Image (cartoon, helix red, strand yellow):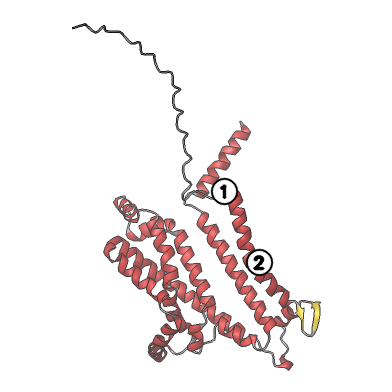
Amino acid sequence: MSAVPLTSVAVEPTTEPAAPAPRARRAPRVGAEHSRLARVVILTLVGLVFLVPIVAMFEFTLRTSGKPGVYSFAHYASVLHPDAAAGVDYTPLFQGIQNSLLICVITVAIVLLLLLPTMLFVELRYPRLRRVLEFVCILPITIPTIVLVVGFVPVYQRVAAIFGSAPWTLAFAVGIIILPYAFRPIATNIQAFDLVTLSEAARSLGGSWPVVIWRVILPNMRRGVISAVFLAVAVVLGEYTIASFLSQTTFQTALLLISQQDPYVATIFALAALIFAGILLVVIGRFGAIRPGDRERRAAARLARASRRTA
């Protein structure tokens, strides 16, 4: 039996290049803020969508009746000085604006004095009823307005027997219509901060409930409350169906009546309503961008810059 010689085999070290380190992937920008270019493009497109009909309406109001291509501000002057000899009377339009503003005030009071305290009470004391309150407030948007009006008719017979048939009583019906629009901004604002912990901390420091609500809770809910109020005003100024079926004179019903006599003046007031709604949106954005403590931070920044200049 022959012995098998053992031979050593030198194993050379492998000289394979090391695998390149994986490149760090850029984190997805889910929910990230849009770039400046994207914001400019979006704002430009949205601005054009709103600007084109506004410019067309303004051009229409400048036309002179029976004279194509001739423009003037005669229709704007006729708003203040209507031709009574021709049977032109804009009194229903001004009366409708007055009634709509009064309904706006009462509707805003319903939001601030009824809806907002109810939402805070449910959030602080009965959070299990949160879904029930949300269902009740969102329900009117799922029902066609014409169906609601049919249901309001027998109710308003009772309301008219108690309060009379004045236009301001429409605020009770409009207050139901604006519930979804007023509820959602306030609910979103409540979910943005820990309302329960903040109120309990303020209470533990000796603050009474009115002080806690006024100085702690409401400053943190400023954006939601302002959005709810302005949306309620916008809905009231644009509401037509309820006022028409209940035979009340509001801004929209008077606008339709005037448009049958003078379409130029009706377009002037419609243009003013659109501009007013745009101003409301800008005000909502400006107030919503303000955060608690911004005034103090700006004052501290000005003081720091002044101290650097004098150093």
Name of the residue lying farthest toward the left: 1
Name the residue located 63 percent from the left edge and 34 percent from the top edge.
Answer: 309
Name the residue located 57 percent from the left edge and 62 percent from the top edge.
Answer: 282
Q: Quadrant of residue 113?
A: bottom left
Q: Is residue 236 left or right of residue 162?
A: right
**Res. 51 mark:** 2
Q: Secondary structure at mark 1?
A: loop
Q: Residues within 10 Å of mark 1 (few under 14, many from 20)?
A: few
Q: Earlier in the sequence, mark 2 or mark 1?
A: 1
Name the residue located 62 percent from the left edge and 60 percent from the top edge.
Answer: 45
Q: Specify the amino acid type for callout 1.
A: Ser
Q: Quadrant of residue 91?
A: bottom right
Query: Which image quadrant: the C terminus?
Result: top right
* 100 and 247: which is toward the camera: 247
How far apart are the alpha carbons under marks 2 and 1?
24 Å
Residue 69: image location, x then y, percent: 81, 77
Q: Is residue 250 left or right of residue 89?
A: left
Residue 142: image location, x then y, percent: 40, 75
Q: Is residue 139 left or right of residue 284?
A: left
Q: Specify the amino acid type for callout 2.
A: Leu
Can residue 235 be seen here? The reply is yes
* 220 and 58: which is toward the camera: 58
Residue 123: image location, x then y, percent: 32, 62
Q: Is residue 270 left or right of residue 205?
A: right
